[in-house]
Amino acid sequence: MPILGMPDRPHLESFRRQARVLQRAVRAGDPDAIARLARHHPGAVPDDAGGLQLSAAQLVVAREYGFASWPRLTRYLRTVADHGWDTALGAAPVNDPAEEFCRLACLTYSREDGPARWAQARQLLVQHPELTTRNIWAAAAAARPDDVARLLAEQPRRAAERGGPFRWRPLYYLVYSRFDPAVPAERVLAVARQLLDAGADPNDGYLFDALPSPFTLLTGVFGHGELGRQRQPRHPHWQTLGRLLLDAGADPNDAQTLYNRMFEPDNSHLELLFAYGLGTGDGGPWKNRIPDLGTPAQMLRIQLRWAVEHHQPARVRLLVEHGVDFCSPFEGDGPSWSPGDGRTPVELAQVYGDTEIADYLLAQGAAPLGPDPVRELIAAAFRADRSTLDRVCAAHPDAVAQARRSRPGLIVWAATQAPIETVTLLAELGFDVNAYGRGDAPVEEAWETALHHSAVNGNVELTRRLLDLGADPDLRDRRFDATPLDWARHFHRQSTAALLEPVTAPPPNGA
């Protein structure tokens, strides 16, 4: 797993400089540099660190960024040079009406996305109805088949040309456009067919901010993401447009689509992609460009883990029915929220109190688990099963201390996924109500507190219970340096904001 984030505009020379700096530091005996070498180089530290080769330092740098080798990193940087895109362009207005229309009309997968932008795009098109007549990218974004047909007749190569404010190709503007939720399907499909017939690539995509998961045409069709369905909705005609692209050769193993759509229980995207071979094949052209991308089978295993941990039984059944491995433990590299920690799907279901999923997996052939007091204790707490909890504690007095040591931030996960009684039980067991953890996945990472999540979810009852249990309203999260009250205000959760405001200390100097 990478421990360093890829810079917004990565260049090979900057990574070469990093490797040379590391090489010199190791040769000089710098303890931090030697520790990096020991952590990431398979040969560990040579007897004579003063003779460290540059190739060894390059391997360490590549692995720190999540790549198996220096050649893999350099290959990826060439791909970024060809396919990279900077989301900051979405926030930069342009003077040309056609280009400004494209900028406002399309999803950018940045904080700029949302209905207000699309309303501005509609108004701009009303003010400048001619803007689609000479600009194929605007004509595509507006789904104007007559304009697209004429512009392609003049210059057929326009179907593959980059342009507009984002330097995207025309089909990409069509697929990512959201300015008109009532756009007729026949217009959208007509433009898509025109561009595909003229040579547009159904697997076109870009690496947003140099992130290694490509945002493809299918990604744009299916929409959604971290900002939710309101600000990043799917295309109004996602099913017919998605089928058109898949029929044209789009690879169904689209990792970013799977990620963007995993937050909600709807499985319609998976059903369509499975019909076209999701989980099979070699991963398509993007896997060829970026070998470090997961295989189709690995992508679906990650989906299975998320579905188990987030109580999505229908998705678990769908994945199992399509042959996803539900018996093996999760091992190897994965996203930070899907670690290779050796747990099996049925163990995850049991430990977080989801008996429906656990029973289903066991019925399908998953191996039953042996006794484990810590797992049984946490499972009983997540089921709010006080009698079982008392029994486990009586039989295994050390289980509580072991659970607190192994899962110090568990109460944060409980605040997002379990009944309020579970939070109370964990606090009674000595779990720190002010612990830092993650609320989106049950992994130990010091992001925010349980009170942050109750505040942002507008959960007054849980917020009040946490305060009664000793939650500190003045604690700031580790990513945005904000209090729970700040979270509530930012997301317009008036009910929890009103509860937190009287007990939160005012910022210094009234800031």
Image (tube, helix red, strand yellow):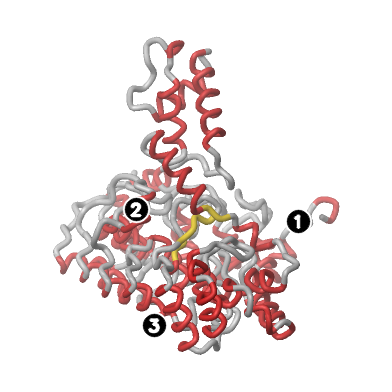
Task: Tell me the SS state at disc 3.
Answer: helix
Q: Residue at x 31, y 58 (%)?
A: 284
Residue 227 is situated, as x and y percent measured from the top left of the image, at 56, 67
Task: Say if residue 1 shows up in the picture.
Answer: yes
Disc 1: which residue: 505
Asked which quadrant contains residue 283, the reply is bottom left
Q: CA distance from mark 1 to mark 2?
A: 51 Å
Disc 2: which residue: 287
Residue 329 is situated, as x and y percent measured from the top left of the image, at 24, 51
Q: Residues within 10 Å of mark 2 (few under 14, many from 20)?
A: some
Task: Tell me the SS state at disc 2.
Answer: helix
Q: Residues within 10 Å of mark 1 (few under 14, many from 20)?
A: few
For marks 1 and 2 on the same chain, the one whose residue lies earlier in the sequence: 2
| Whether residue 273 is situated above or below residue 407 in the rendered picture | below
Identify residue type, mark 1: Ala
| Circles 1 and 3: CB atoms closer than 8 Å | no
For marks 3 and 2 on the same chain, the one whose residue lies earlier in the sequence: 3
